[in-house]
Image: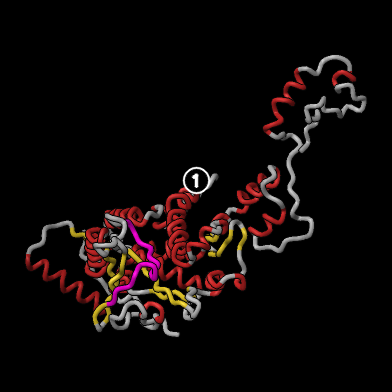
């Protein structure tokens, strides 16, 4: 069955432009390759999105590939030509370069989504139908254009003014910054190429007239030919060490460009500039996850859940989830403390932790424990009152129970071990 067999039954306007073998980077590659800062920013974001494991879940249960066709796509790739990692990285790179990324759905004979194919963002234009206010996409190719309803397209984009038009291109926002960056680099290269590169400096303690200059020019010529330099009395020679000095303001100007790119793409400056500045409590990493990665992940989760699942499935608890646990694995000390707190407070069992670490469960690892020094909130008041009114003999303190374990009818023991 063809790629658009279902869609073509509704839209008889020629073939749609989808070429799986043609890169959609016709303009983007040239732009990304011309500026290493832009390339670095796009690489950081696209790799971060692609590195988050994607899965189909029903409630808190992760579905296996054999349980649902969407789960199979998440595990083995969204089309036959790309892995899931390659697809997500390419989609995010397209979004960063063009302001929006579009994926076209392919359906099987049961009208289930079986593949996603990336479109060229430059050839896709979102439009609103005036009478119904429904969103369509006008997709251009060499034969004209085709109109496709939004239910057949998955879109992720940057900020737009009205929420449905194509997102603003970050590269367009950075146009002036990139032009400034090119001027600075051109100036720096000119300094390297055409700057003065002396090896020796001859100091002359007298004023030179034209004839004296000719004399010294002849002396320098002999030095170049024979490697011997003759100096008159009162003259001195000093060596200039190899190296070219560049105005330090060139580096300051480059940092300005990096800061602007980092600001537009929402990436911490230190990460984009390559500054090694790791605080003890990982505040920079936490801010990066919260302010940069989390919004991206939420956008992809909602776009894929809406585009790949039916309304009935969504109402029954199905959803696409990106796991962010892997981002914390670099700091194993903090991760270990996190697991320890979870087990100690009873909201993690051993098998929960092993699943997060991609380890198999073991028998008996599903038990939950809680510390002896903790007590259920609903029992706290009765426990405190028992301690206040605990005077008298041992028998009275124990509520008339010689073994010391009576709860006085309030259901709370003195030890309150839960």
Residue extending furthest left?
210
352, 59: nearer the viewer: 59
| Image quadrant assignment for residue 328 | bottom right
| Image quadrant assignment for residue 102 | bottom left
- Residue at image position (38%, 61%) is 41
Q: Which SS does the magenta portion mostly show? A: strand
For residue 168, side relative to residue 358 (left or right): left
For residue 152, side relative to residue 254 (left or right): right
133, 240: nearer the viewer: 133
For residue 50, side relative to residue 22 (left or right): right
Residue 239 at x, y = what percent? 30, 63
To which residue does mark 1 refer?
Answer: 283
Residue extending furthest right?
402
| Image quadrant assignment for residue 224 | bottom left
Residue extending furthest top?
392
Quadrant where the image shows the C terminus: top right
Residue 146 at x, y = what percent? 28, 77
- Residue at image position (54%, 57%) is 324
Residue 303 at x, y = what percent? 43, 62
- Residue at image position (46%, 56%) is 298
Q: Which residues are magenta?
A: 146-159
> Do we see residue 309 in this rendering?
yes
- Of helix, strand and loop, which one carries label 1? helix
- Residue at image position (89%, 21%) is 400
- Graded by Cα atoms within 10 Å as few (under 14), some (14 to 19) or many (20 or more), the crowding at tag 1 reads few
């Amino acid at each position: 069955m063809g790629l658009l067999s279902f869609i073509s039954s509704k839209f008889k306007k020629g073939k749609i432009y989808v070429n799986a073998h043609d890169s959609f980077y016709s303009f983007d590659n040239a732009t990304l390759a011309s500026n290493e800062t832009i390339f670095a920013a796009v690489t950081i974001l696209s790799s971060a999105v692609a590195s988050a494991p994607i899965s189909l879940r029903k409630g808190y249960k992760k579905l296996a590939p054999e349980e649902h066709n969407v789960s199979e796509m998440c595990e083995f790739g969204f089309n036959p030509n790309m892995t899931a990692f390659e697809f997500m990285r390419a989609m995010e790179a397209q979004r960063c370069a063009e302001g929006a990324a579009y994926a076209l759905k392919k359906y099987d004979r049961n009208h289930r989504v079986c593949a996603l194919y990336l479109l060229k963002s430059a050839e896709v234009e979102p439009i609103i139908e005036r009478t119904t206010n429904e969103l369509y996409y006008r997709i251009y190719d060499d034969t004209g254009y085709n109109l496709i309803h939004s239910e057949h397209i998955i879109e992720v984009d940057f900020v737009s003014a009205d929420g449905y038009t194509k997102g603003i291109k970050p590269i367009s926002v950075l146009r002036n910054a990139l032009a400034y960056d090119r001027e600075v680099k051109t100036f720096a290269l000119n300094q390297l190429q055409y700057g003065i590169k002396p090896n020796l400096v001859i100091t002359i303690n007298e004023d030179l007239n034209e004839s004296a200059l000719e004399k010294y020019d002849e002396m320098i010529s002999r030095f170049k030919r024979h490697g011997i330099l003759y100096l008159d009395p009162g003259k001195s020679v000093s060596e200039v060490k190899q190296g070219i000095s560049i105005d330090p303001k060139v580096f300051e100007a480059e940092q300005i460009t990096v800061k602007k790119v980092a600001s537009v793409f929402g990436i911490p400056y230190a990460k984009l500039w390559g500054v090694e500045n790791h605080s003890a409590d990982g505040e920079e990493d936490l801010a990066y996850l919260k302010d940069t990665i989390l919004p991206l992940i939420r956008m992809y989760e909602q776009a894929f859940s809406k585009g790949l699942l039916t309304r009935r499935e969504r109402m029954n608890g199905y959803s696409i989830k990106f796991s962010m646990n892997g981002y914390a694995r670099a700091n194993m000390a903090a991760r270990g403390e996190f697991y320890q707190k979870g087990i100690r407070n009873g909201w993690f069992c051993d098998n929960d932790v092993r699943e997060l670490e991609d380890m198999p469960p073991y028998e008996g690892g599903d038990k939950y424990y809680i510390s002896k020094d903790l007590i259920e909130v609903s029992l706290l008041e009765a426990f405190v009152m028992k301690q206040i009114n605990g005077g008298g003999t041992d028998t009275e303190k124990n509520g008339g129970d010689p073994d010391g374990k009576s709860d006085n009818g309030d259901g709370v023991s003195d030890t309150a071990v839960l």
